Amino acid sequence: MNDKSLRVLASIGLGVGGALGLAGTFAPSASLRGLAWGIDGIALVMACGLLTLRFFRMGQEIVAAGFLVFAIGESLLVSSAAMDLAQSAPSFGGGVGLWAAELALISVPRVFPMVVRLLGLAAALLFAATACRIFAGAQITALSQPLPFFTYPVLVATFVGWIVTILRDRAAVARPSV
């Protein structure tokens, strides 16, 4: 797969994931929410797998590791997408904890523009707070307000920044030497 195809496919995955993730949050029924979040999660895992490869090839190992951690966290979340929200809380806590870690790994290196990095770091802090509260025993679900509910738009704004940056990036991907 050439770099342009990889960038476009990863961007589509991020876009579908962001759009359906938000749509699922406002879905009128649990079954529609589960469907939206299931497709959202699959699209994000696919996108993150591709971006892991791309950034690793570019020599950006920390960012690549961030996308790998994102794929793992999203896999945990998609496994409980169709579950009752209260029953999925422990998996949700683990997933958003991994989201916090991946957002930090991707946002600290100077790969994305500063505004995108700041959005990612803000989302990381908010998801870390959510995960800590769940791990400490708080009864928080994916739709609890204010957190994590109001963090999702920050996450999706970060996705938009990633998409724009990735689609504009025409840098040649360095192949690792053997």
Image: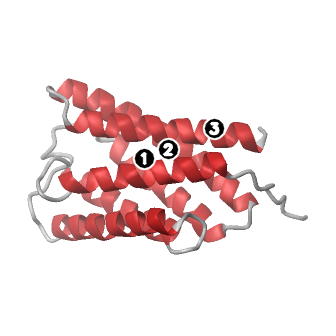
At which x and y percent is residue 30?
Answer: 17, 29
Rendered-image quadrant of the C terminus: bottom right
The answer to whether residue 174 is visible is: yes
Observer-nearest residue: 59 or 119? Answer: 119
Residue located beneath label 3 in the image = 8
- Depth check, mark 1 against mark 3: the one in front is 3
Residue 82 visible in the displayed image: no
Q: Report crowding for label 2: few under 14, some 14 to 19, many 20 or more residues within 10 A (C-alpha).
A: many
Q: CA distance from mark 2 to mark 1?
A: 7 Å
Q: Residue furthest right?
A: 178
Residue 141 at x, y = what percent? Answer: 15, 51
Marks 1,3: beta carbons within 8 A: no
Q: Pinpoint residue 124: horizontal percent, then vertical percent.
A: 35, 67
As helix, strand or loop, the secondary structure at mark 1 comes to: helix
Mark 2 lies on residue: 45
Q: Which label sits on residue 75?
A: 1
